[in-house]
Image (cartoon, rainbow, N blue to C red):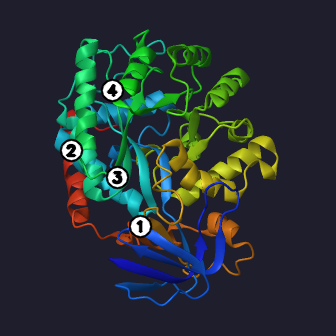
C-alpha cells in the first residue's frame, strides 16, 4: 500500500533540533505503513495506490500521550468537587465492580476516542488487578480484591483491537502473594502484551505504585522487575497537594533502590523540591506532564520550564477522559502554555513550538519509542493528522506552527492516519467495532451502577 500526500503544510518535528520542521507546501510518501520520503514543492512522479491532496491543510505527527488511562472513557464528569484521591474513590471505586469484558469495551472506546482526536500513540496505564481502595494516612491498606489475569489482558486487547499504538503499563499489585508469585503474575501480563502485534504494542512497562503502596520495599521489587523483564517504569508521583512532606519522603525509596535512570518516568511530578528535580535530571529520568488533569484535580502546576532547563526530558500526556473530560490535545497544549505563563509571568517560559514537541516527539522520547513514532521522518510509522485551517477558518496564518497550536480545535481535525491507513474521518472512527463499543459502554456501565450505586 502506497500513499502520497501533496499540497500539505507539513510540520515534521525532527529529532535533534528545536526547529519544528515546517514546510509551507510539501509532500510525504508512505509505503507499507512507513514514511519513505518527504520534500518541498511538487512530489516526484511515481506509481502509487493513492494520492491525498490536502489542499493547504496542516499535516503533522499524530499526538503522543505519555500518560493515559484509556479504560476511563465512560466515566467522565465524576468527582468534580474532589482532588485526586476523592476523585479516585468515585472513578476507581466504580471500576472495582467492572468485569474483564466491561473493562475491554471501556478501553476500546477510550482508544478509539483518542484516535479520533488525533492521538495515535499512548502510554496506557491499565486498571490494576487489585481493585481500588481508599487512601489512609498516605497509603493503601493493600488487601482489596484481586481480579483474574484476564482483567489486564483484555485491556491490552482493547488497545490492539482499536488500532492505537501503545506502551502497556501494568500494576504489580505487590501486596498480594509472595515475591515469586508477584513476578510470575507480572511476567504473564508482559508475555501477553509482547505476543500482540508489535507494530501496535510498542512495549511493556510498570505502573509504579510506591506513592501509595504500604510495602516499605515497593521500589526494590519494581526495580527487580524492570531488570528481570526489560521494562520501563512510570510512577504517579508527587501529584496531589495533600501530605506533601510524606510524598516527598518517598522519593528516596526510588533513588536508593536504583530506579533513577532513562527507564524511569515520573507522572505529574508537581510537589517537588529543587533537590528532587536536580537528582532526577542528573540521573536521566524523565517526567510526563498532564496540564489539563492537573488543573481539573486542583493538583498544582509542575515546574516544567525549570526541569527542561536542567536537562530533564519531558513528555505531555492527556491522562484520561475521566479527569480531563475530553481527550483534546490542543486544549491540553494550550492549558499547559497558559498555566506556565501565568505561573512565571514570562511568555517565553512555554512557547507553542515547545508544547507541540512535548506532545509528540517528547512523549515518544520518554517512552523510548521515538525510533518509531513522534515525528514525520523517513523510516518512522506514518502516523499523522490532517488539520484544515479553513474549517473553521482561522484567518491568515501569520505564524503557521503557532497558529496550529493556538488556533486549532477538534473541529479543524479532518483525518487521522495510523501507518498510512485512515482511522478517523471528520471525527468518526473507521473501526468496525466503534458502534459496538459505544453501545456496550452506554448499556453495561449504567447496569453496573444500577447494581452497585451511582458514582458521585
Instruction: Say which label, 1 or 3, has the lower sequence index.
Output: 1
Say if residue 175 shows up in the picture.
Answer: yes
Q: Is label 2 or label 1 in front?
A: 1
Which residue is located at x 68 percent, y 81 percent?
Answer: 395
Q: Based on the displayed image, in which of its 4 quarters is residue 91 positioned?
A: top left
**Proximity of marks 3 and 2: CB atoms separated by less than 8 Å:** no
Q: Against 196, is 120 above or below?
A: below
Q: CA distance from mark 4 to mark 2?
A: 16 Å
Instruction: Say which label, 1 or 4, has the lower sequence index.
Output: 1
Q: CA distance from mark 3 to mark 4?
A: 20 Å
Say if residue 77 shows up in the picture.
Answer: no
Read off the residue under disc 3: 110
- The answer to whether residue 205 is left or right of residue 96 is right
Q: Based on the displayed image, in which of its 4 quarters is residue 309 positioned?
A: top right
Split into 4 quadrants, where in the image is the C terminus?
top left
- Neighbor class of circle 4 (other Cα within 10 Å; few <14, some 14-19, many 20+) is many
Which residue is located at x 17 percent, y 30 percent?
Answer: 148
Tell me, for residue 132, which label it has, or none.
4
**Proximity of marks 1 and 4: CB atoms separated by less than 8 Å:** no
Read off the residue under disc 1: 34
Q: Position of residue 40 (x, y in %)?
A: 62, 81
Read off the residue under disc 2: 102
Instruction: Say which label, 4 or 2, has the lower sequence index.
Output: 2
Determine the secondary structure under disc 3.
helix
Q: CA distance from mark 1 to mark 4?
A: 40 Å
Q: Is label 1 or label 3 in front?
A: 1
Instruction: Say which label, 3 or 4, has the lower sequence index.
Output: 3
Front residue of 123 and 295: 123
Which residue is located at x 25 percent, y 56 percent?
Answer: 161
Amino acid at each position: 500500500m502506497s500513499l502520497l500526500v501533496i499540497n500539505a503544510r507539513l510540520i515534521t518535528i525532527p529529532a535533534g533540533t528545536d526547529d519544528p520542521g515546517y514546510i509551507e507546501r510539501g509532500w510525504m510518501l508512505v509505503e507499507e505503513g512507513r514514511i519513505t520520503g518527504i520534500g518541498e514543492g511538487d512530489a516526484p512522479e511515481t506509481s502509487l495506490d493513492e494520492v491525498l491532496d490536502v489542499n493547504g491543510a496542516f499535516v503533522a505527527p499524530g499526538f503522543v500521550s505519555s500518560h493515559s488511562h484509556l479504560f476511563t472513557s465512560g466515566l467522565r464528569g465524576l468527582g468534580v468537587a474532589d482532588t485526586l484521591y476523592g476523585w479516585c474513590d468515585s472513578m476507581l471505586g466504580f471500576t472495582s465492580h467492572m468485569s474483564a469484558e466491561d473493562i475491554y469495551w471501556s478501553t476500546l472506546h477510550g482508544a478509539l476516542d483518542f484516535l479520533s482526536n488525533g492521538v495515535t500513540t499512548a502510554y496506557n496505564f491499565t486498571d490494576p488487578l487489585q481493585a481500588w481502595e481508599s487512601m489512609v494516612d498516605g497509603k493503601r491498606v493493600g488487601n482489596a480484591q484481586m481480579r483474574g489475569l484476564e482483567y489486564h489482558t483484555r485491556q491490552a486487547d482493547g488497545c490492539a483491537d482499536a488500532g492505537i499504538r501503545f506502551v502497556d503499563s501494568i500494576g504489580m499489585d505487590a501486596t498480594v502473594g509472595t515475591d515469586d508469585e508477584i513476578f510470575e503474575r507480572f511476567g504473564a501480563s508482559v508475555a501477553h502484551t509482547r505476543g500482540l502485534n508489535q507494530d501496535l504494542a510498542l512495549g511493556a512497562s510498570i505502573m509504579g505504585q510506591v506513592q501509595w503502596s504500604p510495602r516499605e520495599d515497593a521500589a526494590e521489587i519494581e526495580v527487580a522487575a524492570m531488570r528481570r523483564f526489560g521494562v520501563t517504569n512510570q510512577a504517579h508521583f508527587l501529584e496531589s497537594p495533600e501530605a506533601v512532606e510524606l510524598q516527598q519522603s518517598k522519593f528516596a525509596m526510588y533513588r536508593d533502590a536504583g530506579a533513577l535512570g532513562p527507564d524511569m518516568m515520573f507522572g505529574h511530578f508537581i510537589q517537588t523540591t529543587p533537590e528532587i528535580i536536580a537528582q532526577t535530571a542528573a540521573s536521566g529520568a524523565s517526567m510526563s506532564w498532564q496540564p489539563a488533569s492537573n488543573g481539573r484535580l486542583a493538583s498544582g502546576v509542575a515546574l516544567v520550564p525549570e526541569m527542561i532547563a536542567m536537562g530533564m526530558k519531558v513528555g505531555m500526556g492527556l491522562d484520561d477522559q475521566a479527569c480531563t473530560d475530553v481527550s483534546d490535545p490542543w486544549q491540553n497544549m494550550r492549558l499547559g502554555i497558559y498555566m506556565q505563563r501565568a505561573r512565571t509571568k514570562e511568555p517565553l517560559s512555554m512557547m507553542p513550538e515547545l508544547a507541540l514537541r512535548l506532545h509528540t516527539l517528547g512523549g515518544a522520547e520518554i517512552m523510548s519509542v521515538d525510533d518509531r513514532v513522534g515525528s514525520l521522518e523517513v523510516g518512522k510509522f506514518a502516523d499523522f493528522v490532517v488539520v484544515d485551517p479553513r474549517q473553521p477558518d482561522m484567518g491568515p496564518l501569520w505564524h503557521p506552527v503557532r497558529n496550529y497550536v493556538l488556533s486549532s480545535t477538534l473541529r479543524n481535525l479532518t483525518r487521522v492516519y495510523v501507518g498510512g491507513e485512515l482511522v478517523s474521518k471528520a471525527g468518526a472512527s473507521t473501526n468496525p467495532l466503534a458502534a459496538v463499543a459505544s453501545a456496550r459502554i452506554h448499556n453495561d456501565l449504567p447496569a453496573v451502577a444500577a447494581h452497585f450505586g451511582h458514582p458521585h
